[in-house]
Amino acid sequence: MKDKVIALDLGGTNIRVAVVDEKLNILKQIKDKTISDNPTKLMEKLISMIKDCSHDYIDDIKAIGVSICGVVKNNQIGKCGNLSIDHNFDLYNVLKKEFKIDNIKIANDANCSALVEARFGANKDVDDSIFVTISSGIGTGLVLDKKMVDIAFEGGRQITEYNNEYYENEYLLSGNGIVRLAKLNQLYVENGKEFFDLLKKNDSLAKRVYEIWIRKLSIFFSNLQLLFNVEQYAISGGVMLSKDLFLNDLEKIANASISSWKLRPIKLVSAKFGQDVGIMGATSLVI
């Protein structure tokens, strides 16, 4: 197939640029560290990386899709805290002018991931679905009737209470959040993997922290289901490396908490696209 897409995955840590065909084959991909403190230099770097990656395919490029870690509405980028972007980051018009391409679409990264999982991934057999990534933070994207809901859906920013203090959900429940929650309970671990390794060994303090974490995370999913009543959740992120330890518990407890409501059951599955979900999500915007 001749037509190709430039897919740009702009995260808080890394930038990935790829040339992808309409069958989701990655033909070429390059990766570099994100510039997180200078939007002007970041823009320059993005243009340079796109040119480097697409040089051999430039005559076949018909569209550009961008997945970005921040607020996006109608292709206009708003606040992206991890990139020090507040406003005036007009990537859409810069790309249009630089590459003379009309089919350019930009969306929030979790929304892109939700779309590609709904069209081609774990949620392709259902109409209404949610994508959740639980890694350094918690990202959520919503698809209803196979269509991406293009809003700033910051599920990880919802507020939870613990020990008479208020926190964002992801501060305590993400991969990094587990480390913070453990510390609040006098358990000191470097990362989520270390925590789950202790859990495998039946460490008593790790088990106590786990009970707090799994119940709070279950409430997070229960609230999502009360709001949107979707058919399935595709879950991604670093904590899924330990899914055998918690996924069944998470689904069971979350469903128990909404049992009095006549809702669809909460069904949790592993997302199909791993490290390539950003690239695939960006591609799905424009094919």
Image (cartoon, rainbow, N blue to C red):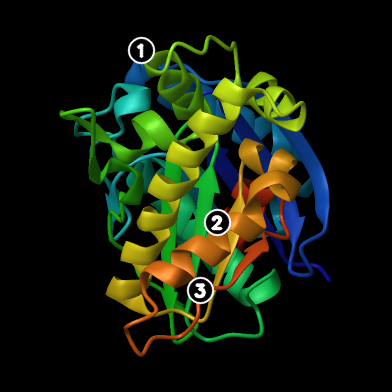
Task: Say what amino acid the circle numbered 1 marks.
Answer: Asp
| Relative to 96, 53 lies left or right | right
- Lower position in the chain sequence, tag 1 or tag 2: 1
Name the quadrant of the N terminus.
bottom right
- Is residue 215 or residue 16 the one in the foreground? 215
- Name the residue beneath numbered marker 1: 37
Mark in front: 3 vs 2 = 2
| Circle 3 Cα neighbour tier, 10 Å, few/some/many (<14 / 14–19 / ≥20) | many
Q: To which quarter of the image does residue 219 belong?
A: bottom left
Res. 266 mark: 3
The residue lying toward the viewer, choosing from 248 and 67, is 248
Residue on which the image places disc 2: 250
Q: Secondary structure at mark 3?
A: loop
Asked if disc 1 and disc 2 are in contact, CB closer than 8 Å, the reply is no
Q: CA distance from mark 3 to mark 2?
A: 10 Å
Dot 2: element: helix
- Whether residue 11 is visible, yes or no, is no
Residue 274 horizontal/vertical position (percent)? 72, 48
Measuring from the top left, give residue 16's x and y in whole percent.
64, 35
Residue at 33% from the left image edge and 55% from the top image edge: 75
Q: Which mark is residue 181?
A: none
Specify whether 140 is left or right of 240.
Answer: left
**Labelled pair 3, 2 in contact (Cβ < 8 Å):** no
